[in-house]
């Protein structure tokens, strides 16, 4: 895997997948290489993969990054923001692309969505890379839960979230363009309906993904930042999930919830072997 990474990658205009309730925006590198579909976590944009996606394209992969329902250039208003609903968007996208089984890279809630997609349509999925995965309920105090939901309340919720994730979810190193990314994220969250979508997504209990874990039949790699503040014990959570999935685990020491943006070169090194093996097996 090449270590060369763009310092200021550009985000192309999105293509739109029309669904019954709205549209899902995605960016497709095109080509005939093995398909890798990358989904961000809640409260994040598809450009979370702005460093990783171009590097994978240079390695010969066809890379598709998506905006979750409610975020980015996808429609803001939906009836359902659960991980199973997001998983159905991923399935619909893969059916439209008709590009063969894909490796799914899911971050945070999108890891749960990837699990749902892999069990709902196993023939479309060659493997899973679950990054900082919320795929089962995580024990959290009622006080912390209350404070988190209060922080997301309007009118201050958008600014509070952008400040929090920028300050806390990259504990080792800030991406050089983080201020630019955060400005785009803040502008997006201030659009009508976005924070309401975020609040509803944040209320997901992850039981839908948890119920499907034992039914996953594809190779799985769990990637966890060793200093991810979203988990009381990140390493134990990663090992527990990998154990349920009979998968592999990579702990990225010192990194947080977004290792693909915090240290993209190390992230690519961590997943490159799994990608090659998974695509070859497909």
Image (tube, rainbow, N blue to C red):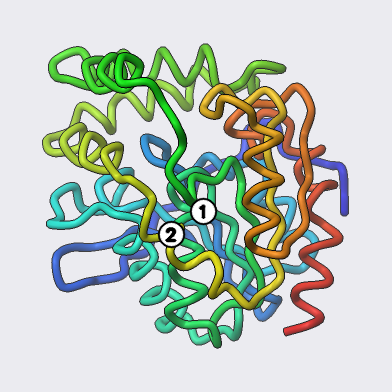
In this view, the residue in front, 151 or 56, is 151
Looking at the image, do the residues carrying marks 2 and 1 touch, with CB atoms under 8 Å apart?
A: yes
Q: How many marks?
A: 2
Residue 96 found in image quarter? bottom left
Q: Secondary structure at mark 2?
A: helix
Mark 1 Cα shell of 10 Å, populated few (<14), some (14-19), many (≥20): many
**Residue occupied by mark 2:** 209
In this view, the residue in front, 258 or 82, is 82
Q: Earlier in the sequence, mark 2 or mark 1?
A: 1
Q: Residue at x 63, y 64 (%)?
A: 128
117 displayed left or right of 30: left
Residue 250 found in image quarter? top right
State the CA–CA distance, disc 2 to disc 1.
Answer: 9 Å
How far from the left and from the top, in percent, is residue 36?
62, 66
| Residue 225, numbered circle | none
Mark 2 Cα shell of 10 Å, populated few (<14), some (14-19), many (≥20): many
Q: Residue at x 16, y 36 (%)?
A: 196
Looking at the rendered image, the quarter that the C terminus falls into is bottom right
**Residue occupied by mark 1:** 111
From this view, report whether residue 19 is shown above or below residue 143.
below
Looking at the rendered image, the quarter that the N terminus falls into is bottom right
Q: Secondary structure at mark 1?
A: helix
In this view, the residue in front, 78 or 18, is 78
How far from the left and from the top, in percent, is residue 223?
70, 45
How far from the left and from the top, in percent, is residue 71?
30, 44
């Amino acid at each position: 895997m090449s270590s060369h990474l763009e310092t200021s990658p550009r985000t192309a205009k999105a293509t739109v997948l029309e669904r019954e309730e709205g549209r899902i925006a995605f960016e497709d590198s095109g080509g005939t290489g093995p398909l890798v579909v990358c989904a961000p976590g809640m409260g994040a944009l598809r450009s979370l993969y702005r460093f990783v996606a171009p590097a994978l394209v240079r390695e010969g992969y066809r890379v598709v990054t998506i905006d979750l329902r409610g975020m980015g250039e996808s429609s803001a208003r939906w009836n359902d923001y659960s991980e199973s609903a997001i998983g159905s968007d991923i399935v619909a996208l893969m059916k439209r692309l008709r590009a063969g089984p894909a490796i799914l890279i899911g971050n945070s809630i999108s890891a749960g969505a990837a699990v749902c997609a892999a069990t709902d349509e196993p023939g479309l999925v060659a493997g899973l890379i679950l990054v900082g995965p919320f795929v089962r309920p995580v024990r959290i105090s009622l006080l912390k839960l209350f404070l988190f939901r209060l922080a997301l309340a309007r009118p201050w919720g958008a600014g509070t979230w952008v400040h929090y994730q920028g300050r806390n979810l990259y504990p080792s190193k800030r991406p050089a363009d983080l201020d630019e990314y955060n400005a785009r994220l803040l502008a997006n969250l201030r659009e009508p309906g976005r924070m309401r979508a975020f609040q509803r997504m944040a209320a997901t209990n992850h039981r839908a993904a948890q119920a499907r874990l034992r039914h996953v039949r594809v190779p799985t790699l769990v990637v966890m930042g060793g200093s991810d503040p979203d988990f009381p014990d990140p390493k134990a959570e990663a090992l527990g999930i990998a154990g349920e999935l009979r998968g592999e685990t990579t702990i990225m020491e010192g990194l947080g919830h977004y290792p693909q943006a915090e240290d993209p070169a190390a992230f690519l090194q961590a997943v490159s072997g799994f990608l090659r093996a998974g695509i070859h097996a497909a």
